[in-house]
Amino acid sequence: MKNLIDDALRSRLVNLRDSEFAAFAERTPRSAAWLSTAAELMPNGVPVSWMAGFWRHRPVVAVSGKGTQFTDLDENTYRDFNLADLSMAAGFAPEAIDRAVAAQSAKGNHFLLPTEDALDVARLLRERFGLPRWQFTLSASGANVDALRVARAFTKRTKVLVFGANYHGHIDEMMWSNGDPNALGMTARAGQDLVTVPFNDIGAVKAALSDDDIAAVLLEPTMTNCGLVMPQPAFHSALRELTRAHGSVLIVDETHTQFAVYGGGTREFSLTPDMVTGGKGIGGGVPVGVFGMSEPLSDYLAANLEGDFMTEPGVPTGGTVYGNALSMAAAKAGLSEVFTKKAHDRVDGLGQQLQNGLQALVDKSGLPFTIDRWGGRCQWRLTTDPPITGYDGYNSIDEDFCDARKGFYANRGIWDAIATSGPAVSFAATQEDVDAFLAVSDEFLAAIT
Ligand code: PMP
């Protein structure tokens, strides 16, 4: 697949990026001062290095947000189309979640004991994804770690199959597979039990499973961290058949896709995985991760309980603040009041308008780009052909294009997406937000052509 940015366009993008980043620096002096003080206490002045690393311009310090908009320390306001990489899909300060969190917080955040809301959250997840039993963590990364551990214990196998250019969290093993084996701090051991094949390549899956030694296959139903890569029509059914035939646990990671359509890819494509993992925004920013299991896996986990006296070795899952009362209250409100089927339909409609509007502007500009979409989540694809593998998707993204866009939009009150995912419509978005995004996109495309 060929990136369609030619030299002339690249040079316009780089010039635009530089001038927009300079203008952005001028609009954000208080954030700059704060970050420089903070750099005495935190690397790059940020509590988590991603907060600096995700943008090539300097980050801003966030002060408050409501609905789709947030304000920085310099009192600049942005309409958000990144949604904290889908961990704020509910929008800022969603009332239903706020109310539930405040009420629970007044009664205690955590007990290392179940609270009644957990039952409702598990029921709501079962309704969406079909799997009968659920467990909770504090992040999707944590959910994938625990799910893989359960799958390995259950199958008594060690290897895991994933699809190239995937992302399943900052887990050593997964970092190895997602195209970044040279990341600093990684050891070669991290990847030794991983088998990586191209997405949509059922022949490669078949060959990889043929020795009956793969504990689990872990995948997103549609790849979302390398642009958007949809599954080919027969891919999922063939994968299900093969994993069953070879005794591998099929784990579908719905961390992003659960916000694209109600019930995620599992429901949309009528999948029957053994496990589903997720997390991110279901608690409106209150940390929560989830994993669901089939009855055999759940019975196995229940029978191999890990306790504080390790007389009998159990399956080690958990963490002292996992499944806490606050997470459960937030997730219950999120799932039952924010991420409803009706709300998904509304967001899908806004996503469609964003896609159609952007595509019309791209066509008007004469650029040979495509706007992909699933639900409210759109994606600029800078190639001609639809991607089939994760690598194709990754090659359809361009850093200079993304940076120029991000700087340009930020200076006009839009917080655009990180390179690999978005722009995405939030569940708090209205027509006005979509129109604002399209108006700035029209200006942006005019500026680069
Ligand atoms: N799985 C997928 C598919 C993801 O996209 C991500 C995060 N981008 C994760 C897992 C990990 O989520 P978190 O960083 O919230 O743990």
Image (cartoon, grey):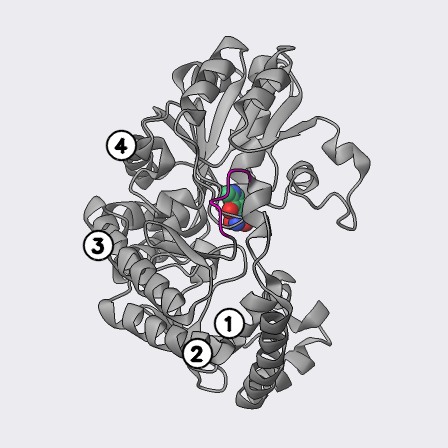
**Few, some or many residues within 10 Å of mark 3 (<14, 14–19, 20+):** some
Mark yes or no: residue 317 visible: no
Which residue is denoted by mark 4 in the rendering? 127
Disc 3 and disc 4: Cα gap in Å? 20 Å
| Of marks 1 and 3, the one in the foreground | 1
Query: Do we see residue 62 in this rendering?
Result: yes
Q: At numbered mark 3, what does the secondary structure look like: helix, strand or loop?
A: helix
Question: How far apart in space, not on screen, are marks 1 and 4 (Cα)?
Answer: 39 Å
Crowding around mark 1 (Cα neighbors within 10 Å: few <14, some 14 to 19, many 20+) is many
Where is residue 83? Give x, y as percent: 42, 61
Q: Earlier in the sequence, mark 1 or mark 4?
A: 4
**Residue plotted at (68% across, 81% down):** 36
State whether the magenta stretch is mostly helix, strand or loop. loop
Which mark, residue 346? 3
Mark 3 sits near ligand 1, with its Cβ under 8 Å away: no
Across and down, in percent, residue 199 comes to 54, 33
Q: Which residues are magenta?
A: 384-389
Up-down relation of residue 396 to residue 292 (above or below): below
- Looking at the rendered image, the disc whose residue lies closer to the viewer, 4 or 2, is 2
Mark pair 1, 3: CA separation: 27 Å
Q: Mark 2 falls on what kind of element?
A: helix
Quote the CA–CA distance across marks 2 and 3.
30 Å
- For the point 34% across and 24% down, the residue is 132
Q: Which kind of residue does numbered mark 1 sit on? A: Arg
Of 158 and 418, nearer the camera is: 418
